[in-house]
Image: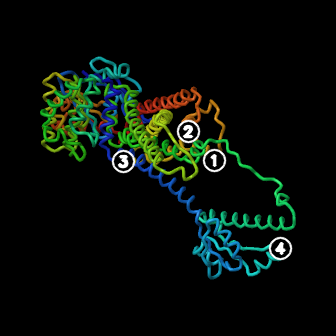
Amino acid sequence: MRPFAVVLVKECLDGVRDRRAVLSALIFPVLAPFLVYFLIHTMIELRSQDKDMLVAVQGADNAPHLMAWMAEKGVEFSVATGDPKTLVSNQSEELVLVIPDNFAARIAEAKTSYVELVSDSSRNDSRITVARVRSLVRGYNSELASLRLIVRGVSPEVMSVISIVDSEVASQQEIATSVLSFIPIYIVLAAFISGMGIAVDSTAGERERKTFEALLINPVSRLQIVLGKWVAATLFAVLGMSLTLVLCMLVMSYVQIEELGLRFHVSALQVIAMLLATLPLAFLATSMQMLVGIFAKSFKDAQSYIGFLVLLPMLPGLYTMFNPIKTETWMYAVPMLGQHLLLTDVMGGVAVPVVGYFLSPMAVLLLCFVFSAITARLFKRESIIFS
Amino acid sequence: MIEVKQVSKQFGGVSAVKDVSFLAPAGQVTGLLGPNGAGKSTTLRMLYGLLVPDTGQVFIDEINVAENTRLAQSRLGVMTDNHGLYARLTAREHIHYFGRLHGMESEQVEARASELITLLGMGPIADRRTHGFSQGERTKVCMAQCLVHSPGNVVLDEPTNGLDVMTTRIVREVVQELRVMGITVLFSSHLMHEVARLCDNIVIVSMGEVVAEGTTEMIKLLAQEDDLEDAFVKLVEQVIPL
């Protein structure tokens, strides 16, 4: 057996027995699908909520026709008593619709009637309801306006100069993917979290336990030692990633995503392609963590630096979430961005150019080897061996 | 055989080791004696290839350590002074790991591990994880680790530091046995009586320099003292600037 394999086997054994490493490798993959389920479930809940909305009204008797019209659209009413502004500001009501006494009289005179919508725009949870009430009132307004025009022998079309017709080019699967863009972020996170325990324990831990010196006296090249440790940590990272991916996909097949008006189906082949696309990230994550770990004198010391590393792979994901970009071939060669593009494209059922499949792992693996070579060099530095 | 030739090492402008030379012949126990901070550990680290000397060379069985580090290391068994262990591995797994790193086959290591476990009286702790081991138990594991590949040269850095009488005796017995087997033993310590008892030859270092070298009788003669401890103190203080 090559020394590389000896180190690999030992680190795996050590890692499996390390409760801290095993927990950090497993907690996230098991937790992430629950989060996915919870998030989608909440989205569906929100959707079904606005089908029957409860709105507090003051002076409902002043506009029986408007009330009836809104009730038809699925709105239920409650009577608000007291000062509407106080009711909203002390959070006992999301919003209050105030209808003045002269409402019906002004309509009868064909004058503009006013209704007051009392709300608190700093509250996120009421925004949807407020927007919906606003659009309902507008709808009622344009319906009445059209009737007034017809009565006067004018076509309502006079009032509508331009009307927008929505036309969607993204496939249902692509829309679903953009809604579900947190799944790729989870998978990338899993790569960084699952291998961290071993990556840190086999570098900073080795220094902390004072075993480093004895290890390096053995007639083995530093590169072999680093490679053994690296591959061991990567195995954990790959395990965590695969588990996260498979469990997320499993949850997706249970959740009623159709309720969101979306369609999402991923085949086993796609899951495998997604796994292959993101696999290099596991290598990258652990090689970076080992490089940081070898600078740290203890496990805790290392953890405080490595926290920042997790943010790195999330950048392309977050960036594209807010600034959609047009994919160019060179982008596949950018580590982490390439993986993110591959993952979202495969998940969305978009064809990826073959060169992308080659370019993205090559770029990442190259970077990995650079990191590992630097780590191996650091293994020779006197200040790191004896401290 | 271990040969140190005019070795010097500086750390940030401070000389830790200055022009140190000595010879540790095969089949003899050589003691590297010196007060704390005399440069013992630095000298040993250059000897087993983890520090590169600024000037001078070290030879293990006539192999130049700087030029052929791994070959030299394969002839060496080293026990460092910090006795660090992997808390989640058993004593036997430690021996196994180091044996495999020295390129031994699995069966070979198994047999050798059992041999060492008997030799060092580690039977009851052999298959326990090393977490919570006493200083004596840790020393035994490190000792077994250092001897697993049956090296021709053994370097022990302060092996009896903080040990109880029983474990100290075991260490002494093992050192005697190694000598009988014709192995080169280099032993560092700051304990005079320890060295006087075990070593054929003594190299006294102080302030990074060799101040005396020879048998206990020769050392006493050199310092013109009857007591070895007095001789040691006198020789060491010669080079300490007042």
Residue marked by disc 2: A340
Of A192 and B238, nearer the camera is A192
Q: Earlier in the sequence, mark 1 or mark 2?
A: 1
Q: Earlier in the sequence, mark 3 or mark 4?
A: 3
Q: Secondary structure at mark 3?
A: helix
Chain letter of disc 2? A
Residue marked by disc 3: A23
Task: Measure how far apart labels 2 and 3 are at the Cα level.
Answer: 26 Å
Residue marked by disc 1: A322
Question: Residue B17 is drawn in which quadrant?
Answer: top left
Of A193 and B157, nearer the camera is A193
Q: Earlier in the sequence, mark 4 or mark 1?
A: 4
Crowding near the residue tagged with mark 2, few <14, some 14–19, many ≥20 C-alpha atoms within 10 Å: many
Crowding near the residue tagged with mark 3, few <14, some 14–19, many ≥20 C-alpha atoms within 10 Å: few
Of B1 and B149, nearer the camera is B149
In the picture, the quarter occupied by the N terminus of chain A is top left
Q: Tell me the tag on residue A110.
A: 4
Q: Tell me the tag on residue B118.
A: none
In the picture, the quarter occupied by the C terminus of chain A is top left
Q: Nearer the viewer, mark 2 or mark 3?
A: 2
